[in-house]
Amino acid sequence: MGMPYKTLNASMNKKAKHRVLVAGGAGFLGSHLCERLLRGGNTVICLDNFSTGRMENLHHLLRFDTFSFVRHDIVEPIDFAVDEIYNLACPASPLHYQADPVHTMMTSVLGALNLLELAAHYKARIFQASTSEIYGDPHVHPQPETYWGNVNSFGPRACYDEGKRSAETLFFSYHQQYGVDIRIGRIFNTYGPRMRTDDGRVVSNFIVQALKGEDITVYGDGSQTRSFCYVDDLIEGFFRLMNSPTSIQTPVNIGNPGEFTVSQLAEQVIAMTGSSSKIVYRTLPVDDPHQRKPDITVAERTLGWRPTVALTEGLKATIAYFEHQLAPVSKELAIVA
């Protein structure tokens, strides 16, 4: 059954700053956010259905008396009296969100609707983890928040792209119609410890392949670009956006504007891991964006936020994490009585 976990404790610490609900809290980003909120003195209720989240991401948080976990799918309504809500619940890699496109769409739309209803009822501030994918394969570079995007509503990525676009519309509509205090962060490529080894996104794929000595798979000719934000920087952006004293009801890009080609990333991972892996090229997937780089002018001006972790520094920490994840279990620990 794995390590037991605490369920919701209705009599949680009343001295905590805020009572915060984190949907998708057992995931890569969600677990880092829960940790940041707990260290800030908040009471945290973590929701997750474990579609991609993992209990092992939360083990170190169980020592906090102000932390509770509830297994729940936000497609179904839920009722907790809270001050703040962070909605991070949705598979974020193409490998996982394309596995069940209908549920991905339902999570983005029905899940957002249920959490917005909760926010409206308790007058809670609510944060939506949106995505740079709403820009699609962009015709504008870098991408500012004012760009409407170039998204294929019938493509294999549409369940995620259009789901997140629809969620933004719901957030705006609840603010406009019911006065809900909303915050929307558009996340660009993010990496770091607690990513799954089977995550399917470019940083984790390259690191895992390099550590295993396998060929590193580059889709397309490798000239497509990405901007990689380390998880600590991203969570700081979330925190500043949510806690800004100035009402920000429009989306804000949160990402690192440093731009690299996919081939450059592959070469850097090989060099940093000392791997003998070779780069092999495969056909570019349908609707895969050719350029991705955030314009973070709004975040800099309104939040005073800019990423500080260089790619080399972030990759070093991420590689160390995956080395530990892939390390063989010792024979003594593997013995089963």
Image (cartoon, rainbow, N blue to C red):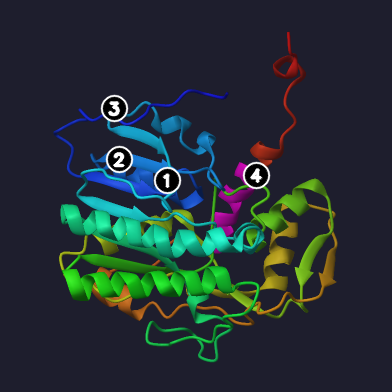
Marks 2 and 4 sit apart, C-alpha to C-alpha, by: 27 Å
- Tag 2–tag 1 contact (CB < 8 Å): yes
Q: Is residue 306 left or right of residue 249?
A: right
Report the amino acid beneath label 3: Asp
* Residue toward you, 285 or 180: 180
Residue that label 2 marks:
44
Q: Secondary structure at mark 1?
A: loop
Q: Which badge, 2 or 4, comes first in the chain's sequence?
A: 2
Q: Is residue 43 visible?
A: yes
Query: Residue 148 is drawn in which quadrant?
Result: bottom left
Looking at the image, which residue is at 47% across and 30% down?
59
> Mark 3 vs mark 1: which is more N-terminal?
1
Q: Which residues are magenta?
A: 310-321
> Circle 1 is placed at which residue position?
25
Q: Is residue 316 left or right of residue 124?
A: right
77 or 234, nearer to the observer: 77
Instruction: Identify the image quadrant of residue 170.
Output: bottom left
Assign the N terminus to one quadrant of the image: top right
